[in-house]
Image (cartoon, grey):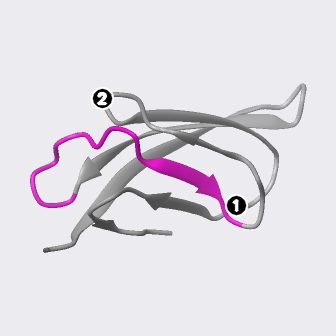
Amino acid sequence: MKLQILSFFAFLFLTNAFATGIVRGTVTDGTNNEPVANTNVIIVGTTIGTTTDFDGNFSLKLNEGTYSIQFSSLGYAAQI
């Protein structure tokens, strides 16, 4: 079985009033740029996470700070 690489695009939008932000992005297959549904999106070292929708989109609300995000899906190599 050939492992494929996930690629992603994430955007951080900060709202200064609450010192929180929203990370939004799309997870795509690194070889054909097709969206990858049901990908686990986890903030490393926390219990915060979500999964992508059918179109590979995700959204996470986070406090202001620096984070590492891990992406994993069956049949793909995990990416941080």
* x and y, in percent, of residue 43 in the image: 67, 56
Mark 1 residue type: Tyr
Q: In the image, is 12 to the left or to the right of 5?
A: right
Q: Quadrant of residue 37?
A: top left
The residue mark sitting in front, 2 or 1, is: 2
* Element class at badge 1: loop
4 up-or-down from 37: above or below: below
At 28% from the left and 43% from the top, the residue drawn is 36
The numbered dot on residue 36 is none
At 34% from the left and 36% from the top, the residue drawn is 56
Q: Could you give the CA–CA distance between mark 2 and mark 1, rounded to whole angstroms? A: 24 Å
Q: Main secondary structure of the magenta part?
A: loop
* x and y, in percent, of residue 62 in the image: 76, 41
Mark 2 residue type: Asp
At 26% from the left and 63% from the top, the residue drawn is 75
41 up-or-down from 50: above or below: below
Q: Residue furthest right?
A: 18
The numbered dot on residue 55 is 2
Count of numbered marks: 2
At 73% from the left and 48% from the top, the residue drawn is 48
The residue lying toward the viewer, choosing from 67 and 29, is: 29
* Element class at badge 2: loop
Look at the image and give the residue range highlighted in magenta.
30-44
62 up-or-down from 17: above or below: below
* x and y, in percent, of residue 63 in the image: 83, 43
Q: Earlier in the sequence, mark 2 or mark 1?
A: 2
Give the quadrant of the N terminus. bottom left
The residue lying toward the viewer, choosing from 11 and 80, is: 80
Q: In the image, is 22 to the left or to the right of 29?
A: right
The numbered dot on residue 67 is 1
